[in-house]
Amino acid sequence: MVRRFEELKTGDTFAWQITTEEYPDFKNRYLIITYYYNKYSENDQCKIFRVKITKTDKIPQNIEEISKLESIKLAYNIYDLATQEYSEAKAVKPDKYGYIYQYTVEVLCKRKTIPKQMIYIGNFKINAIENEFYFAKGPRNQYQASWKYFEENILQSYVLYNQKQFIGYTKEGNKEIYARQLDFENFRKHLKKLGDAIDGPNGNEVLKKLGIDIENEVPLADALTYVGPDKDEGIKKNLSAFIK
């Protein structure tokens, strides 16, 4: 039985019973989690999984039962924008809303042992998901989650995309999502272009045009002076504003 992340092999499959109160409609059903190795997208502390969901509180026992389960769409991309950036997207057919979907999740695994909630079922051959948008050569835009909030993270995506509660499935919402994503992509490209220029041979000149003079920059420690009554208490008070 696989109990450590270092022992994982592609196809190792686990059942995770849903207990979260945040999504009571799914309580006692199972998330079926299958490990999928991708050398471009993981390291010693990061693993890639696909996730399905059961309709009942019964754990599937074989590949036939697992294959019948619904695969969870974990993230979306707008087809028209994705094809401009990723060659893989051109082979995927968008749905009627113009979206293509990712079915893999990247999970940070700092501990060596697999969470106790994961019940090992066995190792099964992974069947390709029809019309999947998958990054074969890297973790670009990979959907991420944590074990601590795994149920909530995954079920949120399930409700949004599988159950179509995402605002992008409405006429006005679709337009809004497209415009927002287009602005983000243009901003991202602008930042990349700026970053390349700063890293180039004329980087200092570029920074000066932005109002940053590296050669005459004052060290941060010399530029700041604390004026509060008690330094430790002042730090605690400022940090508390960011902690719920």
Image (cartoon, helix red, strand yellow):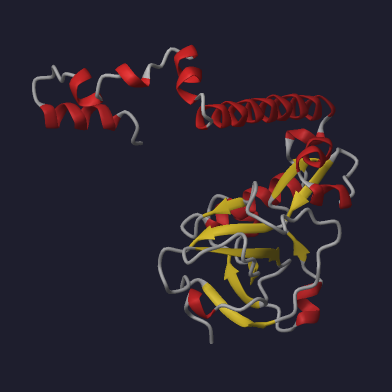
Q: Identify the image quadrant of the C terminus.
A: top left
Q: Nearer the viewer, residue 47 or 207?
A: 207
- Asked if residue 147 is positioned above or below residue 221 in the image, the reply reads below
Residue 106 image-quadrant placement: bottom right
Left or right of 50 on screen, residue 83? right
Left or right of 172 on screen, residue 48? left
Q: Nearer the viewer, residue 217 or 117?
A: 217
Residue furthest toward the front? 201
Left or right of 166 on screen, residue 213? left
Residue 23 at least partly seen: no
Left or right of 240 on screen, residue 182? right
Position in image of residue 195 (x %, y %):
55, 30
Q: Nearer the viewer, residue 148 or 89?
A: 89
Q: Residue at x 63, y 30 (%)?
A: 188
Q: Residue at x 48, y 14 (%)?
A: 210
Position in image of residue 27 (x %, y %):
60, 61
Q: Residue at x 60, y 66 (%)?
A: 28
- Asked if residue 113 is positioned above or below residue 170 in the image, the reply reads below
Residue furthest toward the left? 229
Q: How many marks?
A: 0
Residue 77 at least partly seen: yes
Q: Nearer the viewer, residue 50 or 142?
A: 142
Position in image of residue 90 (x %, y %):
86, 47
Position in image of residue 98 (x %, y %):
86, 38
